[in-house]
């Protein structure tokens, strides 16, 4: 009897190994790889192609991103580690953004066949289903994403935000409540709990958590948005002085955050500090691929107008209306600016003529 049990156990182990090989093969096929054995590691090249793919994604060149993520995966020689799974997720996102939703779902399916506890794959596939209008499948995947998220606040928060945008706010709120149950008193936990309270509209608790967070020195290499969230919370409470203080504190270490620079510009505009506002908008435009470029350009033009720099404002508005023809208000304002600069030119010309005549009479 004992011998039979040992035989059964060996068969089960053998079957599990065989199944794992099949799954690995399926994942490799979905990745476009050839299983040639581990061979020489090419992690450095893999990371380089991954970086190129990420840069292409940021630039909106999704075909280039897909190609480079595939080149990165090709370096692995069929070896599947966390790095390859991460690249698979990035490739799936690039496929989706390139209009290849079904291919993106297929990559997620293969990853989950390999690792049924991979939260990111459930999350991304849930997003794809939600975009396709299949809320039942999306909710099922979101449930699994939360189940395997561990202490990843970002997934819980994103689940809430995605469902809120889809008109399913109540379904999303349960994930915020689940996230609040996570234990921890470090800066990471305090920051994320504070932001969750902010999303829930409990600004008093948000302030309490975030003030504790900013009082803790971040660890080396640690980066969060504690100061940003505290600034946003103060703004909701009408405390502009505190909001400005923490927006500036955050901007000092995040000079590439165009959203924060826009907000600082808006706050400076409200205080009639037009030169500062213009400088903030221009810094935002100098960041790489600002997601709020249109708003920054409108802000810069408005600040220049307030500074009576009508010629500069007109030149920038001329290009703006070409880039954003749907902005009818801007088109009307452009006509106003042309009138203002024409009047300014006429005044300057008349002044020059007067000075010339005066000069002649003196002589």
Image: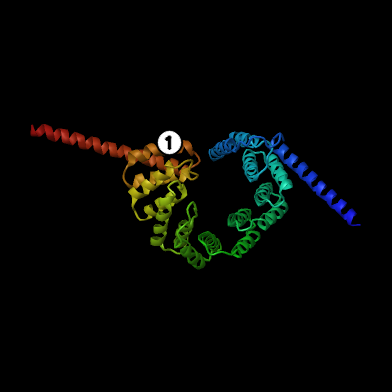
**Residue visible at 36% across and 46% down?**
279
Categorize mark 1 by other alpha carbons within 10 Å: few (<14), some (14-19), many (20+). Answer: few
Which quarter shows the C terminus?
top left
Residue 160 position (above or below residue 289) = below
Pointer 1 residue = 319
Residue 74 position (above or below residue 130) = above
Q: In the depicted view, which residue is nearer to us: 274 or 220?
A: 220
Q: Measured from the top left, where is residue 323 in percent x and y?
A: 48, 37
Residue that protrudes farthest toward the right in the picture: 1
Could you tell me which secondary element the residue under label 1 belongs to?
helix
**Residue visible at 43% across and 36% down?**
319
The colour scheme of the drawn protein is: rainbow
Residue 16 position (above or below residue 246) = above
**The image quarter in which residue 350 lies:** top left
Residue that protrudes farthest toward the left in the picture: 363
Q: Measured from the top left, where is residue 227 in percent x and y?
A: 45, 58
Q: How many marks?
A: 1
**The image quarter in which residue 47 lies:** top right
Which quarter shows the N terminus?
bottom right
Q: Measured from the top left, where is residue 109 in percent x and y?
A: 72, 45
Q: In the depicted view, which residue is nearer to us: 261 or 268?
A: 261
Q: Measured from the top left, where is residue 250 in percent x and y?
A: 43, 54
Residue that protrudes farthest toward the front in the picture: 3
């Amino acid at each position: 009897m004992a011998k039979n049990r040992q035989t059964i156990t060996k068969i089960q182990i053998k079957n599990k190994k065989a199944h794992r090989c099949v799954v690995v093969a399926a994942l490799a096929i979905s990745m476009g790889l050839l299983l040639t054995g581990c061979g020489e590691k090419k992690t450095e090249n893999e990371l380089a192609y991954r970086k190129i793919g990420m840069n292409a994604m940021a630039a909106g060149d999704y075909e280039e991103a897909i190609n480079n993520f595939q080149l990165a995966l090709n370096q692995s020689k069929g070896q599947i580690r966390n790095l390859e799974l991460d690249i698979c997720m990035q490739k799936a996102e690039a496929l989706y953004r390139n209009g290849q939703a079904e291919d993106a779902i297929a990559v997620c399916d293969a990853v989950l066949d390999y690792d049924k506890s991979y939260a990111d794959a459930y999350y991304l596939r849930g997003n794809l289903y939600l975009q396709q209008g299949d809320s039942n499948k999306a909710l099922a995947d979101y449930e699994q994403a939360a189940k395997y998220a561990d202490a990843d606040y970002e997934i819980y928060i994103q689940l809430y935000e995605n469902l809120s945008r889809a008109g399913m706010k109540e379904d999303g709120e349960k994930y915020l409540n689940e996230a609040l149950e996570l234990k921890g008193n470090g800066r990471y936990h305090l920051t994320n709990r504070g932001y969750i309270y902010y999303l829930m509209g409990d600004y008093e608790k948000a302030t309490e958590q975030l003030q504790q967070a900013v009082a803790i020195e971040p660890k080396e290499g640690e980066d969060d948005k504690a100061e940003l969230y505290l600034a946003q919370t103060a703004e909701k409470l009408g405390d502009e002085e505190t909001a400005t203080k923490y927006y500036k504190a955050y901007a000092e270490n995040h000079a590439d955050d165009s959203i924060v620079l826009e907000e600082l510009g808006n706050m400076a505009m409200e205080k009639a500090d037009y030169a500062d506002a213009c400088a903030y908008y221009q810094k935002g435009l100098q960041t790489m691929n600002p997601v709020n470029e249109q708003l920054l350009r409108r802000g810069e033009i408005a600040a220049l107008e307030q500074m009576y720099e009508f010629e500069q404002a007109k030149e920038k508005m001329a290009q703006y209306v070409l880039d954003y023809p749907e902005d009818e208000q801007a088109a009307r304002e452009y006509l106003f600016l042309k009138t203002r600069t024409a009047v300014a030119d006429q005044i300057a010309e008349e002044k020059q003529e007067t000075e010339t005549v005066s000069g002649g009479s003196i002589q």
